[in-house]
Image: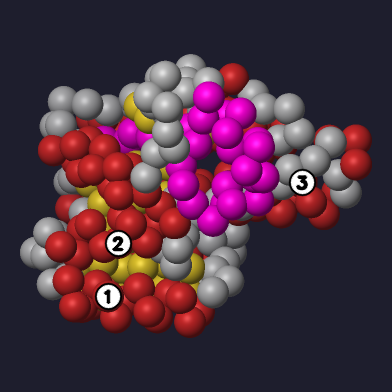
């Protein structure tokens, strides 16, 4: 039975990923950093759907904690086959109005969290001689978004890190890819007004928001595509 660790699994895309791989019968280590009750509920769903859950509650910006997560996963399931770095936060507003604490937290979760999880996972994957990492990114990492300057920077960093790490780890049979999402119908985007959502959707060629379960299917495709690594797959309904 394969084992996957998904960060930010308490809701949105992360929860959809957890459900998807539970249906496939995987061991699912579900990470969450702020909503313990929701994370426990997802773990209960994983069991009902046929997977084996392991709740990992804590801040991905804490390397010691993240390293311990992987030790727990290996102890429980014997190894880790896949890591999906989904945990992220957003901040909408003019950059000039941001406080230092605001951008530091974005950097801690969106960049350092990805680095921490990759570094901790790799030491186990290298021993096993295989593995796959998928980083959930955003089209704003490619194009930039007004009033989301630092968020855009973090996702651009995730894209660059993905490409570079894939080159480094390819000889070790560890693949690294990313999914750059457009407007996905999640809680993170619920702050948009109806008019803002309509404006955005009106510029998407497919004429709708994406769904979290569609992101999960793209992730499954990447896991099955053995000759694909170092790619940032854009999933945005044709927006970019």
Q: In which quarter of the image is residue 52?
A: bottom left
The alpha-carbon separation of the residues under discs 3 and 1 comes to 34 Å
State whether residue 163 appears in this view: no
In the rendered structure, find residue 45 and report the number of the disc placed on it: 1
Indicate yes or no whether the magenta region holds residue 195: yes
The alpha-carbon separation of the residues under discs 2 and 3 comes to 29 Å
Question: Is there a contact, CB below 8 Å, between mark 2 and mark 1?
Answer: yes
Residue corresponding to mark 3: 103
Q: Position of residue 5 (x, y in %)?
A: 32, 60
State whether residue 18 appears in this view: yes
Residue 163 in the figure: left or right of residue 171: right
Q: Position of residue 177 (x, y in %)?
A: 34, 33
Lower sequence index among marks 2 and 3? 2
Query: Which span of residues is magenta-colored?
Result: 175-202
| Residue at image location 79% in from the left, 51% down from the top | 102
Disc 3 packing (10 Å; few <14; some 14–19; many ≥20): some
Q: Position of residue 101 (x, y in %)?
A: 82, 54
Lower sequence index among marks 3 and 1? 1
Disc 3 secondary structure class? helix
Disc 2 packing (10 Å; few <14; some 14–19; many ≥20): many
Disc 1 secondary structure class? helix
85 lies above or below 48: above
| Residue at image location 57% in from the left, 47% down from the top | 189
228 lies above or below 47: above
Q: Where is residue 53 in the image (x, y as percent from the top left)?
A: 26, 75
| Residue at image location 17% in from the left, 71% down from the top | 49
Q: In which quarter of the image is residue 20?
A: bottom left
Disc 1 packing (10 Å; few <14; some 14–19; many ≥20): some
């Amino acid at each position: 039975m394969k084992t996957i660790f998904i960060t930010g699994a308490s809701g949105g895309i992360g929860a959809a990923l957890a459900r998807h791989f539970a249906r496939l019968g995987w061991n699912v280590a579900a990470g969450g950093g702020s909503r313990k009750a929701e994370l426990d509920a997802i773990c209960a769903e994983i069991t009902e759907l046929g997977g084996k859950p392991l709740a990992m509650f804590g801040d991905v910006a804490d390397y010691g904690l993240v390293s311990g997560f992987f030790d727990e996963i290996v102890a429980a399931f014997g190894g880790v086959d896949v890591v999906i770095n989904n945990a992220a936060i957003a901040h909408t507003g003019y950059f000039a109005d941001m406080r230092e604490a605001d951008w530091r937290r974005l950097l801690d979760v969106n960049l350092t969290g990805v680095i921490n999880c990759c570094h901790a996972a790799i030491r186990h994957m290298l021993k096993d001689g295989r593995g796959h990492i998928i980083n959930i990114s955003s089209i704003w990492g490619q194009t930039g978004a007004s009033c989301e300057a630092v968020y855009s920077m973090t996702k651009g960093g995730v894209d660059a890190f993905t490409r570079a790490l894939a080159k480094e780890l390819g000889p070790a049979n560890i693949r690294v890819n990313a999914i750059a999402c457009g407007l996905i119908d999640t809680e993170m985007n619920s702050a948009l007004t109806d008019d803002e959502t309509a404006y955005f959707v009106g510029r998407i060629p497919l004429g709708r928001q994406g769904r979290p379960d569609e992101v999960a299917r793209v992730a499954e495709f990447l896991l099955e595509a053995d000759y694909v690594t170092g790619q940032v797959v854009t999933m945005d309904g044709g927006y970019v």
